[in-house]
Image: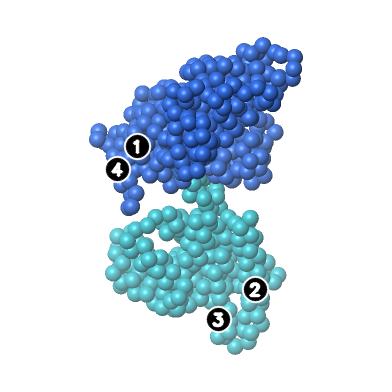
Chain colours: A cyan, B blue
């Protein structure tokens, strides 16, 4: 890899992949639970929850980054408490970048999983129940396997979206080489430095390649979900 | 193995209030028009519907008693449910579908039972297939096998044939008959098709507008004159339990029943076999004198029990020995013949439907 990319560049690539991985898989259980709640239950305030989950889709990422900074900055109420009580610090750290990515890409996951859950015949639950399957049993052996294509689609779409996240990350955790400088931030940094156009182009082409890979995977997963 | 059901529930604009019992193993039909509340009753027995008031006892175990605060969850009730739309698990093979309930049964049937049921339902060649590769009739059979293998204490069949065309129905009905004759389970069979009910059921509970309005043995209920008004279905001429008599050499088979003998086309069934015979009410003509020089093979000496006029039609209830028949004739004919209770008549049976051999026990 070093033949094509300089060490800082491959570092940005690996960091991007790591942040996206953590963001997507940490959010997955929560996204599944949210999708389950929206697909299977009716409760007062459901529209509000649905709206809240989808807010990151319509809000400017920079605004989300700013809100996160306000809440989780070391002088923010929540951030200060986390730091003092547990020694957890999100700002200026790659975990903060992962958190921002997770929030931004959460709606993608919820939507894909919810669609696949809603496509499952509710009668199957009843059938499984009369055959002796408890809630967890049904979840594990009926719901989860049947929602798998949707879960896969959600993961891939969220991963692809996460790789491109810029505004929320740079606002919340800044642009620190080796810590929070993901591919988009590296492209931005290259553009800021004189003679960095070639590097920016290389990184952009790399981003396009990655995006293509993930969009293909997402398409395959969607197609399986429909089949 | 008795089953007692009492369910009362108020829905907006509809009240369900039924009580009935299944006294013995065998098939009890819940018969009634769509929307009468049949499926809700079945769901209450399975536990997937929780009524406001109710008491349900299956095989000596109280699974629901709202006054005592008893509610056994559906997964602990062990009611074998067969749904109209089969509801097979699409991501599992037929084998895994069949074994789903078996693996979860508190006391699973021994492995030989699996082979027996697979053979009974003719599923040997389908075991590795996915449900979407099955025909409607095959799906129904797998659903039946899956329910049976869960070691149920009662089998609930919610219109298992309603979604199928006549050919697929004909494919499953014999299996249901074998089940009735071999499984030794109480079976509740929901249907709005009187011919299915007349063919399969031992007893009938008629449901109308959320109430159980009529119940009794199939032989009595389907030949009752109340049925047309209650169920909106024409009466069945007769359901007769018959025994194959000694062979004849004229290409016919004689079937003996309590009241006489019926001649039908040769069946190839050994003498002594028990059969169920159905006659449609429209297939019975009445004569005041014994007809001579007539092509019909079956002329039965009967006596009129009762008469009910329905528009231009008249249903005439007859008794032939201990067997009841209903003839549907025109009102004009009934008046011309001056039919009245007690009058002796001859029933000319134009055609007879013979159903598959049945179990050799407890006919009334």
Q: Nearer the viewer, residue A116 or B2?
A: B2
Identify the disc placed on residue B52: 4
> Does mark 4 fall on the same chain as mark 3?
no
Query: Residue B256 location in percent, x, y?
Result: 59, 16
Q: State the separation of the CA atoms marked 1 and 2.
A: 67 Å
Query: Residue A22 location in percent, x, y?
Result: 50, 60
Q: Nearer the viewer, residue B169 or A77?
A: B169
Identify the disc placed on residue A188: 3
Q: State the separation of the CA atoms marked 1 and 3.
A: 74 Å
Q: Chain of mark 4?
A: B
Query: Residue B246 location in percent, x, y?
Result: 67, 11
According to the picture, the residue beneath numbered tag 2 turns out to be A208
Labelled pair 1, 2 in contact (Cβ < 8 Å): no
Q: Earlier in the sequence, mark 2 or mark 3?
A: 3
How many numbered circles does the render carry? 4
Instruction: Name the image quarter holding residue B115.
Output: top right
């Amino acid at each position: 890899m070093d033949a094509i990319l300089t060490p800082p560049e491959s570092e940005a690539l690996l960091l991007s992949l790591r942040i996206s991985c953590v963001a997507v898989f940490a959010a997955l259980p929560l996204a599944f639970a949210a999708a389950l709640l929206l697909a299977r239950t009716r409760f007062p305030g459901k529209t509000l929850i649905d709206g809240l989950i989808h807010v990151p889709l319509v809000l400017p990422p920079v605004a989300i980054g700013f809100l996160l900074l306000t809440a989780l900055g070391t002088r923010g109420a929540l951030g200060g408490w986390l730091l003092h009580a547990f020694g957890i610090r999100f700002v200026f750290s790659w975990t903060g970048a992962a958190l921002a990515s997770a929030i931004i890409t959460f709606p993608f996951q919820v939507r894909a999983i919810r669609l696949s859950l809603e496509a499952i015949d509710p009668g199957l639950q009843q059938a499984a129940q009369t055959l002796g399957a408890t809630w967890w049993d049904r979840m594990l052996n009926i719901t989860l396997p049947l929602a798998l294509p949707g879960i896969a689609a959600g993961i891939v779409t969220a991963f692809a979206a996460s790789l491109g996240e810029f505004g929320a990350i740079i606002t919340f955790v800044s642009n620190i080489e080796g810590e929070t400088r993901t591919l988009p931030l590296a492209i931005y940094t290259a553009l800021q430095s004189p003679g960095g156009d070639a590097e920016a182009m290389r990184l952009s082409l790399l981003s396009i390649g990655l995006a293509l890979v993930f969009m293909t995977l997402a398409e395959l997963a969607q197609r399986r979900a429909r089949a | 193995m008795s089953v007692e059901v009492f369910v009362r529930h108020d829905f907006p604009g509809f009240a369900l209030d039924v009580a009935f019992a299944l006294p013995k193993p065998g098939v009890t039909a819940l018969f009634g028009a769509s929307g009468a509340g049949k499926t809700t009753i079945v769901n209450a027995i399975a536990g997937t519907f929780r009524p406001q008031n109710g008491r349900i006892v299956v095989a000596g175990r109280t699974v629901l008693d709202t006054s005592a605060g008893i509610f056994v969850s559906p997964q602990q009730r062990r009611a074998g449910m067969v749904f109209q739309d089969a509801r097979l698990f699409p991501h599992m093979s037929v084998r895994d579908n069949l074994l789903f309930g078996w693996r979860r049964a508190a006391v699973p049937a021994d492995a030989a039972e699996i082979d027996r049921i697979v053979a009974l339902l003719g599923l040997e060649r389908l075991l590795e297939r996915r449900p979407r590769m099955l025909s409607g009739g095959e799906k129904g059979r797998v659903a039946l096998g899956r329910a049976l293998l869960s070691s149920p204490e009662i089998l609930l069949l919610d219109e298992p044939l309603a979604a199928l065309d006549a050919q697929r129905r004909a494919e499953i009905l014999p299996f249901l008959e074998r089940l009735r004759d071999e499984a030794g389970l109480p079976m509740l069979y929901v249907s709005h098709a009187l011919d299915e009910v007349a063919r399969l059921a031992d007893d009938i509970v008629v449901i109308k507008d959320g109430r159980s309005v009529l119940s009794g043995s199939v032989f009595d209920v389907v030949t009752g004159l109340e049925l047309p008004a209650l169920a909106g279905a024409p009466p069945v001429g007769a359901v007769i339990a018959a025994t194959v008599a000694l062979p004849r050499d004229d290409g016919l088979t004689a079937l003996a029943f309590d009241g006489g003998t019926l001649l039908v086309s040769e069946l190839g069934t050994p003498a002594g076999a028990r059969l169920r015979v159905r006659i449609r009410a429209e297939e019975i003509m009445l004569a005041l004198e014994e007809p001579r020089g007539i092509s019909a093979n079956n002329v039965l000496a009967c006596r009129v029990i009762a008469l009910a006029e329905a528009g231009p039609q008249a249903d005439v209830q007859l008794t032939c020995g201990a067997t009841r028949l209903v003839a549907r004739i025109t009102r004009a004919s009934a008046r011309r013949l001056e039919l009245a209770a007690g009058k002796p008549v001859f029933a000319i049976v134009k055609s007879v439907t013979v159903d598959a051999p049945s179990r050799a026990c407890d006919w009334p």
